[in-house]
Image (cartoon, rainbow, N blue to C red):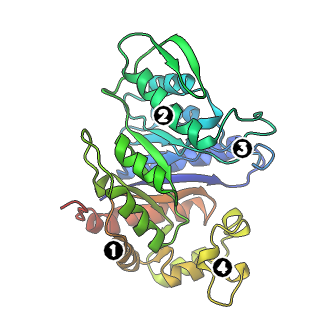
Amino acid sequence: MEFGLFSNGERGNAVAQTTYDEDLAEVVHADALGMSEAWISEHGTLLSWEKPDTMPSADLFICKAAALTKNIRMGPGIRPLPFFHPVQVATDVAVCDHLTGGRYLAGFGLGIGTGNGQRGELPGDRRVMMAEAIDLILKCWTAHEPFDWDGEIWQGRNWHIVPKPLTRPRPEVGIACSRTEGTLEMAAAKGFLPLMSWNPATEQIAQMLSIYTGGSNDAIPVRRGRARVARVVYVAETDKQAYADMAKVDLGVPRATGRLDHYIPEGGSRDDLSMVGLMKSGDFFGGSPDTVYAGLKNFYDAVGGFGTLLIVAGRNWGTWEQRRRSWTLFMEEVAPRLARLDPDQ
């Protein structure tokens, strides 16, 4: 198993620079600890819903972070393809691939909303648009000569991009996967990395991994080791200390919008959801190094194994010093025991 961050930004600062600097500090620390990758949430297709410190352009953040780090690979989690021209996305990825020295990971997904308002009406169904955009992007990366494109959504003549990606035959691509079987099957068929968010319960993650591994790809083998799964993780010296540190955490938008409703105790309500309660129930992973290891190992076994654990970041859950200490404890005392796990062996 490998380890990284899912920087799912929701700090609520009045000035974006404050949040971006905090996010950068987390990525720099993750790199110093030896984490292998970081996925940076990109929001902005519904600007009236987002907060002042939202991150609408993860690529710009990633290129700055690349200059401050040495080894960590980074990608947007995710670029919502229906809202951008595929040739521009293909070009942006290629440039980022060069600027990061090959440490860039492309991240694709549907995004949120139908495009009405700030971005205008979309010219087609989002899933149709995403599927065509992916094929067009892959063509841009790999075509040796300019090509014509006659698709349902986009049409053009003599298309090509400059530069071509640094990484050959193409950059690694992660794709946001949810309940939709088609996206998981696409991840397998296209040789993409399935990205699974921190909200779904254990049973849903297990089902998603089963759908993904049921797919096939002749060029890139479908392996559980390619799956990325995000989870909430907080490590302190003792369980008691972890619960005290997280006692006043506000779960914020995920609780308010119902994304955590499946964790509500029987007969309860959203008011019953708390960080400490979710840690004690085993749905989130918090406590001493031994407690966190045991919880993550049980989760790993229950879902059938996966390749990379992404720790949720980008949120003011505890102080910066508490989060810094948590990740240090995790990488020193928990990660070495989990690193031995190989879901494909």
Q: Quadrant of residue 305?
A: bottom left
Q: What residue type is labelled 3?
A: Thr
Identify the residue at horizontal 27%, vertical 62% (top origin).
Answer: 339
Residue ID for mark 1: 297
Q: Which of marks 4 and 3 is in front?
A: 3
Q: Residue at x 65, y 79 (%)?
A: 273
Q: Please report whichever mark, 2 or 3, sits nearer to the chain's N-terminal start.
A: 3
Query: Marks 3 and 1, how far apart in space?
Result: 39 Å
Residue 273 image label: 4
* Residue closer to the observer: 300 or 314: 300
The single residue placed furthest to the bottom in the displayed view is 267
- Compared across the picture, whether 162 is left or right of 102 comes to right
Is 20 placed above or below 1 here? above
In depth, the one of 163 and 10 nearer the eye is: 163
User: Which callout, 3 or 1, points to the residue nearer the camera?
Assistant: 3
User: Residue at position x 29%, y 49% from top?
Assistant: 216
Q: Name the kind of residue labelled 4 in the image.
A: Leu
First along the sequence among labels 3 and 1: 3
Residue where numbered disc 2 is placed = 134
Name the quarter where the C terminus is drawn: bottom left
Secondary structure found at label 4: loop
Q: In the figure, 44 relative to 268: above or below?
A: above
Q: In which quarter of the image is the N terminus?
A: bottom left
Q: How crowded is mark 2: few (under 14 residues within 10 Å), some or many (20 or more)?
A: some
Tag 1 and tag 4, C-beta contact below 8 Å: no
How many residues crowd mark 4 within 10 Å: few (<14), some (14–19), many (20+)? some
Q: Disc 1 residue type?
A: Lys
Residue drawn 48% across and 34% down? 134
Left or right of residue 120: residue 273: left
